[in-house]
């Protein structure tokens, strides 16, 4: 639900005293607790909306016969909807007026056969869990204190079958043997990838509880890590340390690894020093993306197969600009720096749409300060079309990040940068803002998600996986998981 904006209109009022005239300004406004509301097809309870106005007298009018909007007291408007006897969703407008101030409420009612979608929080799963590319599973692990283990903890892995709602638990796995660190990916075939902490391996666990490591790659220094898989499970993408401190993106095909090609230069058009990490892959395996790992650059790179060969480029080629500048260090000496306006991404694994058409990203600009000792960063949500090679930059939402996108160009955006909180939805093809994430989810699924929620991934079948942000005592801000399955699932 979206809180009403405060609309204010100035009105001049004259007060006469003897031979002088005093003119004062009277503020007129309508402030509503909600300006968008959605109802199911049938069986709805009346909805009360708080109304604050100046002047205090106000009127309300509905534009549709199926909506009754009435003033139930001086501060409350009650909206009642009749059952929907049509075969499709319908909407109308309710108007509130106070003096010259006007505010509108959008009323949406779902089709009559709509039911409440399934919504579950995943508070118990560490890292909020992960969803498989086709939306078959949500999986993750839960940690328990266990004094019988030398390291004091054991883990249980859970696979939630979103077709049936059945939960398969496997384990226990003890920390003294497997130091679980972060959930990476789960396949639609039921294999979960988990990065381990101290030892650095990537562990695979299946529905039967069988555990094995992703094998080492010949000639590389570290254990490899898998970040994401294709829908059929044939292709995995991730990264490995090729030599000390230098990362290379990796593609596995039927379990066989290959190092992906690198751009000639890093994000700043300089020689690579730290390399690139493979982050995600489209469901059909046709598009891969990753991020550079040079200081705080995080330039977004992507690969497409052309004539049987992987071609690599920086995402957002149409908006990318590299500008050499002279900067001044702390001792007052000049040094050369390439400043870049371009697309960046960090460690998210689900920024590519299922068929690889779109990449969710962030457009970051760099501007030197007047004294050239520092630079100013501006960040906007951005989405790159890998077919047209054109970038859509969202300027009107402030500092935001593109976190996920569908093949049809429905873009999911999160507020913030270092720690995501809250979300918005945007139609890239129409260039239209579709509302906050809670508004959009309620309109399309008929359920409420927390105000701080944002989407990590939307599967082709409409299933959503995301996070919401909470403040936990003694820990601080944390991301907890949730998922939604559509009506009729």
Image (spheres, grey):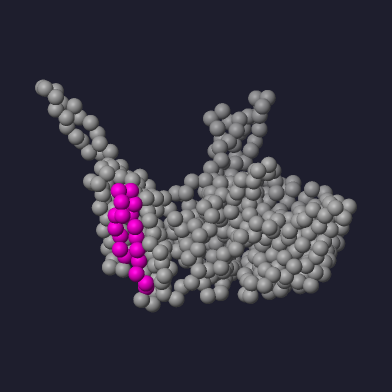
The image quadrant of residue 432 is: bottom left
Q: Residue at x 64, y 38 (%)?
A: 337
Q: Residue at x 50, y 63 (%)?
A: 447
The image quadrant of residue 95 is: bottom left
Towards the viewer: 306 or 195: 195
Q: Up-down: is 239 above or below 332? A: below
Label tally = 0
Residue 35 in sight from this viewpoint: no
Towards the viewer: 446 or 243: 446
Q: Up-down: is 129 above or below 232? A: above
Towards the viewer: 151 or 385: 151
Q: Residue at x 63, y 52 (%)?
A: 479
x then y, percent, for residue 420: 58, 49
x then y, percent, for residue 424: 49, 55
Q: Is residue 382 left or right of residue 87?
A: right
Which part of the image, by quadrant, shows the C terminus? Answer: bottom right
Towards the viewer: 164 or 194: 164
Q: Which residues are magenta?
A: 67-84
> What secondary structure do most residues of the magenta stretch adopt?
strand
Q: Residue at x 33, y 46 (%)?
A: 52
x then y, percent, for residue 335: 66, 33
* Residue 120 part of the magenta-drawn span: no
């Amino acid at each position: 639900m979206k809180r009403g904006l405060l609309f204010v209109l100035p009105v001049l009022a004259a007060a006469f005293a003897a031979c002088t005239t005093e003119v004062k300004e009277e503020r007129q406004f309508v402030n509503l607790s909600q300006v968008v509301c959605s109802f199911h097809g049938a069986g709805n309870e009346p909805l009360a909306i708080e109304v604050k106005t100046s002047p205090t007298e106000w009127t309300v009018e509905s534009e549709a016969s199926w909506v009754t909007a009435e003033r139930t007291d001086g501060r409350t408007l009650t909206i009642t909807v009749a059952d929907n006897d049509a075969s499709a969703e319908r909407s109308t407008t309710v108007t509130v007026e106070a003096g010259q101030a006007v505010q509108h409420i959008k009323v949406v009612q779902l089709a009559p056969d709509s039911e409440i979608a399934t919504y579950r929080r995943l508070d118990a799963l560490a890292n909020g869990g992960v969803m498989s590319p086709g939306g078959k599973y949500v999986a993750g692990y839960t940690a328990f204190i266990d004094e019988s283990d030398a390291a004091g903890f054991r883990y249980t892995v859970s696979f939630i079958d979103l077709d049936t709602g059945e939960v398969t638990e496997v384990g226990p796995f003890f920390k003294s043997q497997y130091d679980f660190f972060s959930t990476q990916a789960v396949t639609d075939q039921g294999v979960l990838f988990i990065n381990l902490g101290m030892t650095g391996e990537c562990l695979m666990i299946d529905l039967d509880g069988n555990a094995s490591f992703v094998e080492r790659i010949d000639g590389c220094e570290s254990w490899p890590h898998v970040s994401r898989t294709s829908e059929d499970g044939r292709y995995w993408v991730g990264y490995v340390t090729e030599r000390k401190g230098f990362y290379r993106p990796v593609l596995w095909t039927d379990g066989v690894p290959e190092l992906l090609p690198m751009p000639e230069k890093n994000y700043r058009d300089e020689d690579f020093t730290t390399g690139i990490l493979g982050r995600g892959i489209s469901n059909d395996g046709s598009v891969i993306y990753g991020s550079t790992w040079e200081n705080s650059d995080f330039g977004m790179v992507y690969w497409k197969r052309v004539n049987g060969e992987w071609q690599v480029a920086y995402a957002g080629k149409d908006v990318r600009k590299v500008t050499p500048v002279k900067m001044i260090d702390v001792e007052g000496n000049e040094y050369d720096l390439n400043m870049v306006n371009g697309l960046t991404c960090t460690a998210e694994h689900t920024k590519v749409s299922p068929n690889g058409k779109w990449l969710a990203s962030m457009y970051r600009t760099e501007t030197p300060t007047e004294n050239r000792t520092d630079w100013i960063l501006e960040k906007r949500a951005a989405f790159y079309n890998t077919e047209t090679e054109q970038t859509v930059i969202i300027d009107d939402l402030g500092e935001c990040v593109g976190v996920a996108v569908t093949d049809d160009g429905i873009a999911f955006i999160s507020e913030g940068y270092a720690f995501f909180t809250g979300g918005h939805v945007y139609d890239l093809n129409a260039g239209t803002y579709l509302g906050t994430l809670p508004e959009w989810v309620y309109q399309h699924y008929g359920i409420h998600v927390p105000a701080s929620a944002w989407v990590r991934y939307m599967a082709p079948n409409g299933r959503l996986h995301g996070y919401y942000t909470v403040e936990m005592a003694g820990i601080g801000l944390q991301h907890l998981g949730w998922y939604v399955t559509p009506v009729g699932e």
